[in-house]
Amino acid sequence: MLSFSDPVQYLKGVGPARGKAFQALGVFTVEDLLRHYPRTYEDRTKVLPIAGLEVGQPACFRAMVMTTPRTSRIRQGLEITKLTVADSSARLNLTFFNQRHAAGHLVCGREYVFYGTVAGDFARQEIANPAFEEADSPPVLTRRILPVYPLTAGLTNRQVVSAVGQALTQCGPPPELLPRQVLEEYRLLPMDKACRAIHQPESGEELAMARRRLAFEEFFQFSAGLALLRAGRSQRQVEPYVPVDLTPLTNRLPFRLTGAQQRAIREIQGDLMEGHPMNRLLQGDVGSGKTVVAAAAAWYAVGNRRQVALMAPTEILAEQHFRFLTKLLTSLGVRCVLLTGSMTAGEKREARQALASGAADLAVGTHALLSDTTAFARLGLVITDEQHRFGVAQRAALGEKGDTPHLLVMSATPIPRTLALMLYGDLDVSVLDELPPGRQKIGTFLVNESYRARLNGFLRQQAQAGRQCYVVCPAVEEGESGKSAEGWAATLQTQVFPDLSVGLIHGKMKGAEKEAVMGRFARGEISILVATTVIEVGVDVPNATVMVVEDADRFGLSQLHQLRGRVGRGREKSWCILVSNSRNPETVGRLKTLCRTADGFAIAQADLEQRGPGDFLGRRQHGLPVFRTAGMAGDITVLQQAQAAATQWIESGGANQDSPLARQLGKLLAGQRETMN
Ligand code: ADP
Ligand code: MG
């Protein structure tokens, strides 16, 4: 009998080579595999007579092979294998492209079940590359709902399906975590049934029940973790801060604080003077001025002889914050250091020494800041900016450094209130609901390819007027789906704007390269910067006035809103041009929401209504925790139920009794940190 913690390659038919491929998917153990859920499903349950097949409608049919498969080579790299099959209703031609080997298994005179889609007109119908298996074999590829898994090079869906099947028979499902009472009260599938059903659903209803159960469990754990964190932290005592005069700092600002900023700063100051660790979320749309609020919080901490750690999700952002804060605070006697992954070992050591000895007051960095090798002499305040994947373990880890530091979490991801209450249940919230004065509305337009010439003309005109433009693409390299930043940057530079400076930045570049490009863009040496979403958060170049998003339909509304926030940061009129060739009315309607409104919360609400909570929970969004299954819950009620159940379970002392769930939560809160990216 295998156990859950055994390496996945111990499974029959997997082995070391395929085990490596699984590792690329983050699947190391049998348990990881059982929690590697299908991306989607193909309903292959319908079995029809050949005469009943319809063009364009995939279905199964049972038929006998009537001719021996014949392969001909059309040209280099293209082989076609043809054969004819028949049932009592009709005959049908099958064609396989470059599948000589697979098709060679078909034996004349035997019966198989095929699955495929008929193409062609009535007279010459045929099916290309159908899946098939012997008619009397158990249904694996046909006659069932087939799970479609996330894959990687060297791994086919069929191999994953079979490995999961092995895991289920050799190991059985993962242990039940939810209390029996909760299962009964909310009518949830027990784990063994749910785990089998998510991988091998027998019907759509069963699949829906499995999803509901798994989403419930994940959110239950998350909510229970938050409730424990909140309870634990609010009981701790810390020395209250003494008041510190803010005027030296505000005097150095080239602007007046907005009312919202003043309110948030007062709320933070109140927390710091209370004697319990602060747990505050600062929510404010892009450009609302969160950094200054963070600077004020840091000022209070340093004024109380405490150290501050400010963490950003990317090096670019960390460096930008570092420049801003150094400029603002150094002359006031605050000693700042930067700590990022791409610094040399010597530089890092120096920065760490300054933090450990107490010579430095403020550290700005990426999540490397909280690694075990970084020690602080007197850490009092941890600030995270747009921290993504901010799950329970990360929150616990933040509070672990030093002596229960105060915690300020900043997020520019506006989320609907209902979701905020669930995701930030452990935090108090300050909202910056007022933009600094003088911000103009960013003209937002949705265009398709037919506007390309005009769009290029517009970019040229802006560049010639001394302005700068971003062009965001969904992919990095050719071959990924959607327009690639590399390819498009080359096209723009060589074919469209040979006389202008076109730059390229994307997430696969090294930190130093990215920084160099961003530096050149910030100094105005690049007119048109082709980018991926690495520029999504925080980057501030006031002279940039145009944001073009290619294949805009591939992005979520909130993400597009974030991208739009990269422009309109200076005095000049700014634009956001969404390029999409989609004709799907729903997609077009979705994108038009963005043209109509600039209110991040309204946009988030529209996202929630149109696409359900999945977008907020399933995909990586800055400032939100990432869930594996909670996004599978079609609607938000399941999550609300899970939260209610979790709160009740905690309140009735569930976490204090020994159970697999209590142990799991304990481990989570003991700071078994995942990586923060
Ligand atoms: P975000 O909330 O997106 O992090 P930032 O802190 O980067 O916003 O601020 C955006 C820009 O607005 C910066 O250039 C900042 O200096 C400026 N800013 C912040 N507060 C004010 C204010 N009260 N008045 C005018 N400009 C401000
Ligand atoms: Mg910011």
Image (cartoon, rainbow, N blue to C red):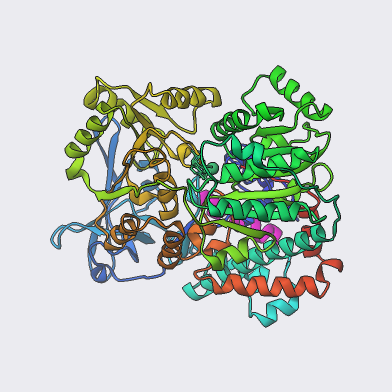
**Residue 588 seen:** yes
Q: How many marks?
A: 0
| Foreground residue among 418 and 39 | 418
Place of residue 7 in the rendered image (x, y in percent of width and height, measured from the top left) = 70, 45
Decide: is 541 above or below 186: above
Horizontally, residue 637 falls left or right of residue 523, namely: right
Place of residue 95 in the rendered image (x, y in percent of width and height, measured from the top left) = 27, 49
User: What type of secondary structure mainly makes up the magenta span?
Assistant: helix
Horizontally, residue 11 falls left or right of residue 126, namely: right
- Seen at 56% across and 46% down, the residue is 290
Q: Magenta region: which residues? A: 158-174
**Residue 390 seen:** no
| Foreground residue among 334 and 286 | 334
Quadrant of the frame with the C terminus: top right
Quadrant of the image occupied by residue 475: top left
Place of residue 113 in the rendered image (x, y in percent of width and height, measured from the top left) = 39, 62
Residue 665 is a magenta residue:
no
- Seen at 75% across and 42% down, the residue is 301
Q: Residue furthest top?
A: 346
- Seen at 32% across and 22% down, the residue is 501
| Foreground residue among 364 and 54 | 364
| Foreground residue among 7 and 65 | 7
Q: Residue furthest left?
A: 123
Decide: is 168 above or below 294: below
Decide: is 365 above or below 665: above
